[in-house]
Amino acid sequence: MADVLNCCRSPSSKSHIMLFANVNSIVATRMIEKLTETGLLDSVHEDGVVYLATPKGTGFVAKYIDLQRLISPELVPIESKLNSPNRLNGLNF
C-alpha cells in the first residue's frame, strides 16, 4: 500500500502503479479501491484516469517510513528505498 501511495505523489496511471508496486492488475485495482475508500488516494480524470495521493495519503507514507526506520534503521537509508523500483535488492530476510 505504501508503494502505491509513494508512486502517486505525482499523478500516476494504473499501469505505472502496477510497475512501481510490482503487482498485477487485479491487486492494483483492489489496492486503489481500498486506498480511495479510506481517503488516502484520489482519482483525477484528465485524458484518462490518473491517481494522486491525498495529503492524508502522503502523511501515511511519511509515518510508514518513520516506522520502518524505528524497526529496522539499516533497511531504510536517508533516501527511502520506497523511491527505488529495485528496493528489495540486497535485503536479507
Image (spheres, helix red, strand yellow):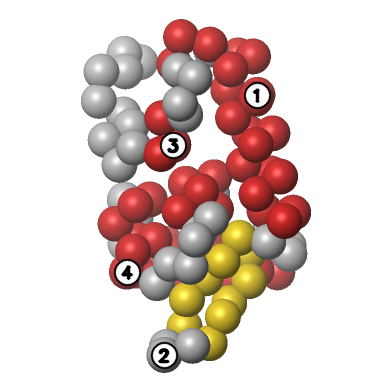
Give the numbered dot on residue 82. 3
Question: For the residues marked 4 and 1, what is the alpha-carbon distance in whole angstroms?
Answer: 28 Å
Q: How many marks?
A: 4
Say whether marks 1 and 3 touch (CB < 8 Å): no
Estimate how packed mark 4 is, as few (under 14), some (14 to 19) or many (20 or more) residues with alpha carbons within 10 Å: some
Q: Amino acid at mark 2?
A: Asp
Q: Write the residue at 69% across / 34% down.
A: 63
Check if mark 4's residue and mark 1's residue have beta carbons within 8 Å: no
Q: CA distance from mark 2 to mark 4?
A: 15 Å
Q: Is residue 55 left or right of residue 17?
A: right
- Name the kind of residue labelled 4 in the image: Ser
Q: Which residue type carries mark 1?
A: Leu
Q: Tell us which disc is closer to us: 3 or 2.
A: 2
Question: In the image, is 8 to the left or to the right of 40?
Answer: left
User: Between 6 and 29, which is closer to the camera in this rendering?
Assistant: 6
Q: CA distance from mark 3 to mark 4?
A: 18 Å
Decide which of 16, 26 is in the foreground and name it. 16
Is residue 34 in view from this perspective? no
Please tell me in which quadrant of the rendered image residue 68 appears.
top right
Q: Residue at x 53, y 87 (%)?
A: 45
Residue marked by disc 2? 47
Identify which residue is drawn at 67% across, 53% down. 57
Where is residue 16, by image quadrant? bottom left
